[in-house]
Amino acid sequence: MLRPLLVVPLLAAAAGGVWLSRGALLRWRDLRSAQTYELAGDQRPMLLRAVGAMLCGLCVTVLTVLVAVGALGTRGAGGAGEPSVEEARAEAGPRPAAAPPDGPGTPAPSPGAPASAPVPSASASSGASAGAPASASAPVAATASGNGPAPVVSHFDSIGHPAGGELMESAVAGPDGRPRTVRVWLPEQYAQDPKARFPVIVLHAAGARKTADTEVPDVFDSIASAVTLGRSRPFVVVVPQAPSGTEHPCELVTAAPQAVSDDASLRTVVAAAFRTLPPGPANWGVLGVEAGAPCAAAAGLARADLYGAAAAVSGRYDNTALTAAGAEAPAGAAPKLLLAAAKADSPGLDAARKLQGALRGGAGQAAKADVRISDIVEDYTPERVRTRLVRVAVQYLAETLAQPS
């Protein structure tokens, strides 16, 4: 405690000495200049500053010696082998509880009996549970449940307000138990009517480990414009992260429809966290834009038990794979699919018509699919064309799904 108290006046004396020395030097230069021109000068200010600087220097010297002596004394005491109180406590560690005295009622342990494990005290247990961070308790839970991934706790946080609504994000456990990012866009009407429940559009991404809103940044504005223009009722939009096991998620969904990114666990989490209509073909639809269009087409054709309608915008399709996926779908309601492309997008319209023809010539549910084509949209910029195409797709989904509650 002594050394910090000495350092403060040491620094103050040093600063005062520097200031006084500088003042004395300046006054000495003024006197030299006055003598050059044979003028009389007063030497007292210079002498006073010089004396003050000398006194400050003396103080600095004395304080420096005292600090140095204190440091040497502390170092010598440490080197003599006498640890400090803190070091002694650290080395000693917690003391074991004293064993109770042997009394007449205390039985002696048998030679072959195993030693019992020490039981922690109540205060130690409560202190560990109250003060330990969540990350510290996670390995314990994982060890108790096996070698699998730790449980994922979903909690949606707001990350923005695009198109007048609110965008939420959380980690949700995937089919393998590992966390994946899920975003949920709530329309403006969600906050206006706290009792209403909303149908859902699942927006599929084409890039592995990506969400569709990062691939199509203006998609929420396009969906909101359909509501603003009175062409659709508001939807809650679920944007799951594409599977990470492949670089081509749409091919995975086509080959294995059960690998859709909005699996049962995601639907359960979304239904519990938001005011959505119950999951199922009456209330949930699927949408894919550009590279994500094949994902939406595959999900709509192969999983009519999950989606009441699907809309694919400006896509290019593998007709053989999609027809096979539709043919192998379980029997049930006929899939409903919209293939939308701009009037000037000749390759996109050609791909849509070829897929429509392939499905009609297919088997099973593929042949029963109700496939419609939208080919009338045109505008003067690609962004405006895409906005209008998404608007048409949302209008189709709103008209096809059941009316809201």
Image (cartoon, rainbow, N blue to C red):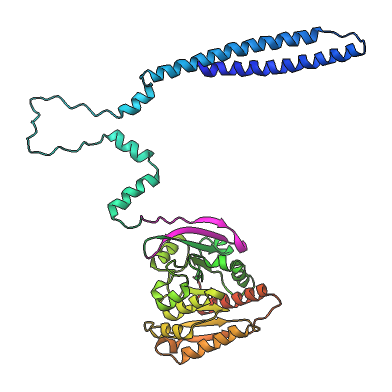
Quadrant of residue 226 within the rendered picture: bottom right
Q: Position of residue 183 (x, y in %)?
A: 50, 62
User: On screen, 83 above or below 399?
Assistant: above
Q: Is residue 166 magenta?
A: yes
Q: Is residue 309 magenta?
A: no
Left or right for 239, reference 136: right
Can you see residue 219? yes
| Along the line of sight, the residue nearer the viewer: 384 or 208 | 208
| Along the line of sight, the residue nearer the viewer: 76 or 175 | 76
User: On screen, 352 above or below 203?
Assistant: below
Furthest residue toward bottom: 361
Q: Position of residue 50 (x, y in %)?
A: 74, 10
User: On screen, 16 above or below 337?
Assistant: above
Left or right for 95, reference 271: left
Q: Residue at x 31, y 29 (%)?
A: 93
Can you see residue 374? no
Q: Which residues are magenta?
A: 150-175
Q: Position of residue 270 (x, y in %)?
A: 45, 63
Number of marks in the rendered image: 0
User: On screen, 143 above or below 297?
Assistant: above
Q: Residue at x 42, y 17 (%)?
A: 76
Quadrant of residue 363 within the rendered picture: bottom left
Q: Residue at x 11, y 25 (%)?
A: 102
Quadrant of residue 106 within the rendered picture: top left
Q: Position of residue 261 (x, y in %)?
A: 44, 69
